[in-house]
Image: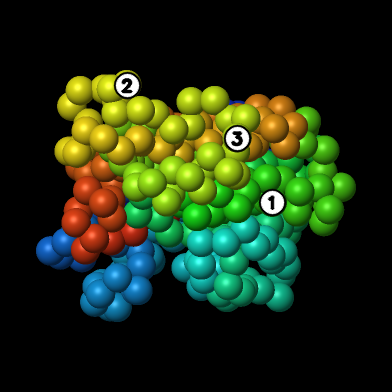
Amino acid sequence: MTDLPLLRFPGLARFPGLEHAVSTRLGGVSVGPFASLNLSTSVGDDRANVEVNTQRLAAALGVPREHFTTTWLVHSNRVVRADASHRGQMVAQADGVITDVPGLPLIQRYGDCAPILVYDPRRHAVGLAHAGWRGTVVGMATALVEAMAAAFGSDPADMAALVGPAIGPCCYEVGPEVAEAVRRAMPDAPHVLIQPAQVARGAAASNGHRPHLDLWEANRWQLAQAGVGQVEVAGLCTCCRRDLFFSHRGDGGRTGRFGAIAMLRR
């Protein structure tokens, strides 16, 4: 084990059958815009540094680095099931991954999009997803819950979920095309689009005319609508807290990625 900073959240931490964590940008070896615990090789960082960072994360979690199982993120609502044969692999192009295999660590990487973790303690199954505005509009959170119900017989009422650190409504100004897509996808979701006059002072620079998207609330609302019994929202804005997280928007598009990890304990 190492002293690498990892965030855990009370709604999921109360389950002894689940290991979960969200990494920060602290404790790695990457430099420049990727300083320091960047976990992605697709952003321009040195691959050797990313490998050292990933090994440090694995050591902090007490799992073999070669067991990390992931997906290629494409801003979709596709969910894939990982079994023991996928251990250590990139399973597919998908933004959601589920498993009922203990000891199989699922990991995805984020730089403003929302991590979504869902655990079913009755069926001992877990799901992990990545939802930016595109994934949210096509119902990534809903698809994750439905996939667990179909694959494992999970009852959403038994599930506990986390919407992890992501860009907050304070900073996520969106254009008219995004706002309209959100309105069409979630016409009954209250408070998902926030008008400029309602945005708190101290938020990221705004032109004063465009709405802000509450990615946290949009995904919380989808999980609640899907019947999930318990939903926790981390409430940590990656753009505001660039001391802790990488932020694609806050860092001007050249930055690293932090990780969210979910694993069933044996």
**Nearest the eye: 206 or 103:** 206
Question: In terms of sequence position, does the residue under pointer 1 or pointer 3 come before the other?
Answer: 1
Determine whether the residue tagged by mark 3 lies in a helix, strand or loop. loop
Q: Which mark is residue 143?
A: 1
Determine whether the residue tagged by mark 2 lies in a helix, strand or loop. helix
Residue at image point 28% right, 22% down:
197
**At label 2, which amino acid type do we have?**
Gln
The residue that disc 3 covers is 187
**At label 1, which amino acid type do we have?**
Ala
Q: Which is more foreground, mark 2 or mark 1?
A: 2
Determine whether the residue tagged by mark 1 lies in a helix, strand or loop. helix
**Nearest the eye: 246 or 69:** 246
Q: Dots 3 and 2: beta carbons under 8 Å?
A: no
Residue at image point 60% right, 38% down:
186
The Cα–Cα distance between marks 3 and 2, rounded to whole angstroms, is: 19 Å
The Cα–Cα distance between marks 2 and 1, rounded to whole angstroms, is: 31 Å
Residue at image point 54% right, 54% down:
135
Q: Which mark is residue 198?
A: 2
Q: Which mark is residue 164?
A: none
- Taking the image as shown, residue 197 lies to the left or right of residue 83, namely left
Picture quadrant of residue 70: bottom right
Question: In terms of sequence position, does the residue under pointer 2 or pointer 1 come before the other?
Answer: 1
**Nearest the eye: 215 or 194:** 194
**Residue at the left extreme, as displayed:** 32
Q: Dots 1 and 3: beta carbons under 8 Å?
A: no
**At label 3, which amino acid type do we have?**
Pro
